Image (cartoon, rainbow, N blue to C red):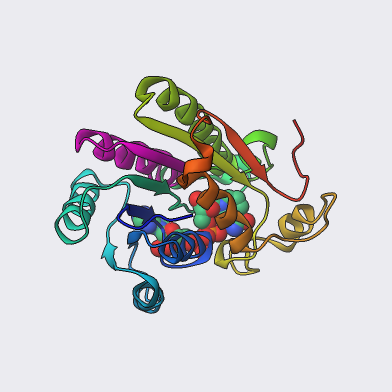
Amino acid sequence: MNLSGKVAVVTGGSRGIGRAIALALAGQGARVAICHHADPAAAATLAEIKALSDGIAVDADVSDEAQVEALFDAANAQLGAVEILVNNAGILRESPLAETEAADFDRVIAVNLRGTFLAAREFVRRGGAGRIINIASDLGLLGREHMVAYTASKGGIISLTRTLARELAPHVLVNAIAPGSVETDMTSPGSMSPEQLAKDMDTPLARFGQPEEIAAMALFLAGPDSRFITGQCFGVNGGSVMH
Ligand SMILES: NC(=O)c1ccc[n+]([C@@H]2O[C@H](COP(=O)([O-])OP(=O)(O)OC[C@H]3O[C@@H](n4cnc5c(N)ncnc54)[C@H](O)[C@@H]3O)[C@@H](O)[C@H]2O)c1
């Protein structure tokens, strides 16, 4: 696959799944803007991107309209018109419903769902034609106790994907990936309880995925071989969801 000349924005591209996607795209020649939220890992990831192609790193909160505009301003000015948008930035909070603060619920929805909406809107407002790839989660399909905001945000991303696929055809193809559990900071013991991590292993393949296994699907969806595919949600999940 040759993505030379294409410009991609990968939100949450500094580490984990986003980093793997950014490197996969850069490895095929795309110029990649990663955005992150005050992540010290961004500089090292940008250096890896630059070893493969051209790129920039922008500290921008995807839930903030002005910062999303600034992200696209920087990408346009330094790399060119954006043709591939990967909405990957996300956060997770774990708490029983009764103990979930409204502010925590709002923050998860703001980053995961509103951030996806804002970046997609900015892409289209600037005449973006090409691909939008939204990172959902298998938990957006399955539900998961103690993750009300996260699962709702991911279910919302899948619905948003279908709506945008209809609205933006044929110039923009919009698809989602719903990963199963992937070994990243988000699934480290400090971020998720041992009980939740144990549940994540209860799949046919009985292991966590690697970020590169999600990036392979993103690369396919960014490239020419997926040109007849829109509005779909791909489970890259070790068999956690089958449909
Ligand atoms: N790791 C998993 O098991 C898993 C499973 C399914 C779906 N996902 C989804 O994949 C995506 C990436 O997850 P990950 O595991 O790589 O997470 P991670 O915590 O390793 O990385 C998150 C990235 O998002 C960025 N980010 C966080 N808040 C942001 C904000 N407000 N604005 C801009 N950037 C922000 C961080 O800087 C970082 O680059 C998320 O949407 C997550 O929900 C992850």
Residue 52 position (above or below residue 235): below
Side (left or right) of 153 relative to 47: right
Q: Is residue 199 visible?
A: yes
Q: Tell me the residue at 44%/59% (across/down).
A: 25
Magenta segment's dominant SS is: helix
On whether residue 164 falls in the magenta region, the answer is: no
Residue extending furthest front?
Answer: 2
Side (left or right) of 73 relative to 140: left
Side (left or right) of 93 relative to 172: right
Q: Is residue 94 visible?
A: no
Q: Horizontal and vertical percent for residue 230?
A: 50, 29
Magenta highlight range: 106-135
Q: Tell me the residue at 85%/49% (across/down).
A: 204
Q: Quadrant of the C terminus?
A: top right
Q: Tell me the residue at 42%/48% (across/down).
A: 86
Q: Horizontal and vertical percent for residue 37?
A: 34, 62
Q: Horizontal and vertical percent for residue 30?
A: 36, 59
Q: Tell me the residue at 54%/47% (across/down).
A: 220
Q: Horizontal and vertical percent for residue 141?
A: 65, 34
Residue 160 position (above or below residue 112): above
Quarter residue 130 falls in: top left
